[in-house]
Amino acid sequence: MANDRDSQSQLGRYAGLSTQWMVMLLVAVWLGHKADLYTGWKVPVFVILMPLVSLVFSLVQLIKEVNRKKE
């Protein structure tokens, strides 16, 4: 019974992380698009860079979260 409860807790945790990643990437692409429109550059530099930077940042946060000891 405790194992089933732990599995549901883990599922909720990873579902929350995946939702957070999707929202973060969508916001990064949207902000990159707005920045590219503002600069007027033909090459979409910010649309490429902003999601990559946010992914690196989130992966570092994820590694810290996974390596953190349970309290």
Image (cartoon, rainbow, N blue to C red):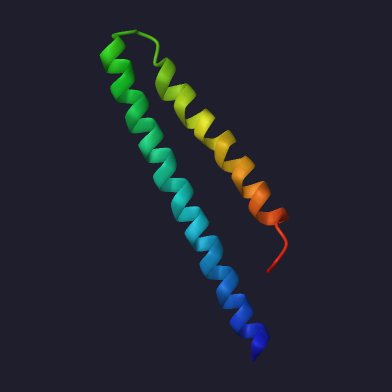
* Picture residue at 50% right of the left edge, 34% below the top: 54
Report the side of 37 relative to 52 (left or right). left
Question: At which x and y percent is residue 41?
Answer: 34, 8
Question: At which x and y percent is residue 15?
Answer: 50, 62
Farthest-out residue, bottom: 1
Task: State which quarter of the image contains the C terminus.
Answer: bottom right
Question: At which x and y percent is residue 56?
Answer: 59, 34
* Picture residue at 64% right of the left edge, 91% below the top: 1
Question: At which x and y percent is residue 63?
Answer: 67, 47
* Picture residue at 27% right of the left edge, 16% below the top: 37
Residue 51 to residue 12: above or below: above
* Displayed quadrant of residue 34: top left
Residue 58 to residue 5: above or below: above
Report the side of 51 relative to 8 (left or right). left
Report the side of 50 relative to 9 (left or right). left
Farthest-out residue, top: 41
* Displayed quadrant of residue 60: top right
* Displayed quadrant of residue 38: top left
- Say how many tags the image has: 0
* Picture residue at 60% right of the left edge, 45% below the top: 61
Residue 46 to residue 62: above or below: above
